[in-house]
Image: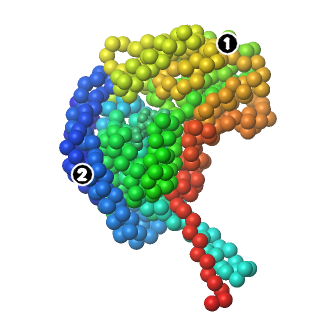
């Protein structure tokens, strides 16, 4: 049950006002390791009304108190210290987190570390660059515009990237002077709880960064709270809509929604096939397909379809050998998050067998834990569930096309609009496609990735607002205009 260093039992409390405290609510739930369904903990608190009230009060006190007096450079120092602390502490924390997330620890030393570290370093440099604006008195009034923090913000996070999500939300929020309460997914709270103490050690005053645990009911308390000024949410479209409604019904808090995807990857006949295969296979198998930007719809031009599909099939079949114990540092692919998600994916795949041609996988892998075989379908019916809906598993669908016009129609015929990829050596076509594809991010000769410096988020029902880069800072501040009467 133990992990390299950190005992899960230490993280069965909430992190409020700079310390781990028992929840006022006595309700708890249990967590299992998806590699074998053994119980990791049976006493994770379900934070209730009183706990949320306490968190909001501490957050407000910090926002109006010590945190408001921090200079930009002091905030930067906290960010840098936190990044330095994580050098030692992150791998044990991600290893602990892996016990319930099933995310392979092999991703920790490079991929996860770089993402989190770079996120902190990037936003550390933004604390003193909220420069605002100035308009001269040509109408008799000087106008000064300030970008002010919103106040108490909440992050409601999904299960599939628990620790990175903490930083990509907290860093722009804190860089701009806000305070944040994080509610991790009920399936993956351990890493978020463990990093909380490092914020304290790095010098952020108590109450600036807090973590409460619990399921949707706890998230709903945040979404409907009258004193919380913003919710930054990542998760499913269904929950995103509930949060938008709760925000509207309560205090019109600002809402950023990073929601699901069904990302198309379009492979033209002139593409570098090896490159296209590498990106599309990685794009559906990373985190066993539990990735919002997973390349789950692959369109390949007919003239190269046989060759591409044959190789894609071979690699998907071979990938079954990469499945294994996520706590083993040599293993690349882990299980689904839990039994419920495995069952859900199996049912969708079962129905898919009547809607498309199953050519690879299609079953649970092994008889222990929540592993799903890498799975590939060809030529789905137009209204097939596997083709239309986000599966959130290692399941991809390949469809062939003949012309650019045809594939554009296919790729855009969806309510999702998070990410797409175009594979071609023709730069004119690539740019034309990048304009026409209705997604928030388009990769050219790549897919299923994000950049810290550039905005990330969805069109259509894949989201509202953007994260990353300067754009995230804008959504954690609000302009205030000061008008000065020059005639007085
Ligand atoms: P989910 O919507 O089930 O849960 C997300 C969070 O919302 C959890 O913390 C949950 O407790 C909370 N929640 C549930 N009901 C709530 C309510 N009524 N009010 C407030 N909070 C509530 O999502 P999930 O299954 O954890 O994550 C998978 C989904 O997240 C997929 O659709 C995936 O595409 C999406 N996702 C999107 C991005 C992105 O950046 N666009 C990134 C990762 C995951």
In the orientation shown, which residue stands out farthest toward the bottom? 488
* Residue situated in front as seen by the camera: 445 or 340: 340
Q: Residue at x 62, y 40 (%)?
A: 459
Q: First in sequence: mark 2 or mark 1?
A: 2
- Judge whether residue 368 can be spotted in this image: yes
Q: Which residue is mark 2?
A: 20
**Helix or strand or loop: what does disc 2 sit on?**
strand
Q: Which residue is mark 1?
A: 307
User: Is 469 located above or below residue 437 in the figure?
Assistant: below
* Residue situated in front as seen by the camera: 107 or 465: 465
Residue 322: percent from left, percent from top: 44, 20
Residue 453: percent from left, percent from top: 58, 49
Q: Nearer the viewer, mark 2 or mark 1?
A: 2
In the orientation shown, which residue stands out farthest toward the front? 249
Task: Quarter of the image for the N terminus: give it.
Answer: top left
How packed mark 2 is, by other alpha carbons closer than 10 Å (few <14, some 14-19, many 20 or more), is: some
Residue 248: percent from left, percent from top: 49, 51
User: Is 481 located above or below residue 155 in the figure?
Assistant: below
Residue 259: percent from left, percent from top: 52, 38
Does residue 465 appear to the left or right of 319 in the view shown? right
Q: Residue at x 70, y 80 (%)?
A: 137
Q: Residue at x 51, y 44 (%)?
A: 257
C-alpha gap between disc 2 and disc 1: 56 Å
């Amino acid at each position: 049950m133990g992990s390299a260093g950190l005992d899960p039992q230490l993280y069965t409390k909430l992190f409020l006002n700079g310390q781990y405290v028992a929840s006022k609510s006595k309700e708890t739930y249990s967590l299992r390791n998806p590699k074998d369904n053994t119980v990791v903990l049976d006493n994770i608190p379900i934070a209730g009304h009183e706990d949320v009230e306490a968190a909001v009060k501490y957050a407000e006190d910090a926002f109006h108190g010590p945190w408001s007096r921090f200079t930009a450079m002091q905030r930067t120092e906290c960010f840098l210290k936190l990044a330095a602390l994580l050098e030692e502490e992150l791998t044990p924390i991600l290893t602990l987190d892996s016990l319930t997330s099933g995310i392979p620890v092999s991703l920790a030393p490079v991929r996860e570390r770089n993402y989190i570290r770079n996120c902190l370093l990037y936003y550390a440099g933004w604390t003193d660059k909220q420069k605002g604006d100035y308009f001269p008195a040509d109408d008799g009034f000087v106008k000064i515009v300030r970008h002010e923090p919103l106040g108490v913000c909440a992050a409601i996070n999904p299960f599939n990237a628990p620790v990175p999500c903490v930083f990509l939300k907290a860093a722009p929020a804190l860089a701009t002077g806000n305070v944040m309460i994080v509610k991790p997914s009920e399936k993956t709270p351990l890493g978020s709880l463990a990093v909380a103490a490092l914020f304290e050690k790095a010098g952020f005053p108590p109450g600036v960064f807090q973590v409460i645990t619990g399921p949707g009911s706890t998230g709903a308390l945040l979404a409907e709270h009258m004193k919380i000024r913003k919710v930054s949410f990542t998760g499913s479209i269904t929950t995103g809509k509930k949060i938008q409604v709760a925000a509207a019904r309560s205090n019109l808090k600002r809402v950023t929604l990073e929601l699901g995807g069904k990302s198309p990857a379009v492979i033209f006949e002139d593409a570098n096939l090896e490159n296209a295969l590498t990106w599309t296979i990685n794009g559906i198998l990373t985190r066993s397909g539990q990735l919002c930007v997973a390349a789950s719809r692959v369109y390949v031009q007919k003239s190269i379809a046989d060759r591409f599909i044959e190789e894609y099939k071979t690699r998907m079949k071979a990938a079954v050998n990469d499945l294994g114990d996520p706590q083993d540092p040599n293993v690349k692919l882990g299980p689904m998050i839990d039994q419920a998600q495995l069952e859900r994916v199996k049912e969708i795949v079962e129905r898919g067998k009547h809607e498309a041609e199953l050519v690879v996988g299609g079953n649970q892998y092994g008889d222990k834990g929540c592993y799903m075989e890498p799975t590939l379908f060809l030529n789905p019916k137009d209204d097939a569930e596997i083709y239309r809906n986000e599966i959130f598993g290692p399941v991809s669908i390949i469809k062939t096309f003949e012309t650019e016009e045809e594939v554009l129609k296919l790729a855009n015929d969806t309510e999702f609009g998070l990410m797409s990829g175009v594979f071609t050596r023709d730069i004119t076509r690539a740019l034309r496609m990048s304009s026409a594809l209705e997604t928030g991010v388009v990769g050219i000769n790549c897919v299923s990735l994000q950049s810290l410096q550039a905005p990330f988020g969805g069109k259509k029902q894949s989201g509202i607002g953007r994260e990353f880069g300067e754009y995230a800072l804008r959504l954690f501040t609000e302009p205030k205009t000061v008008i000065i009467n020059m005639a007085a």
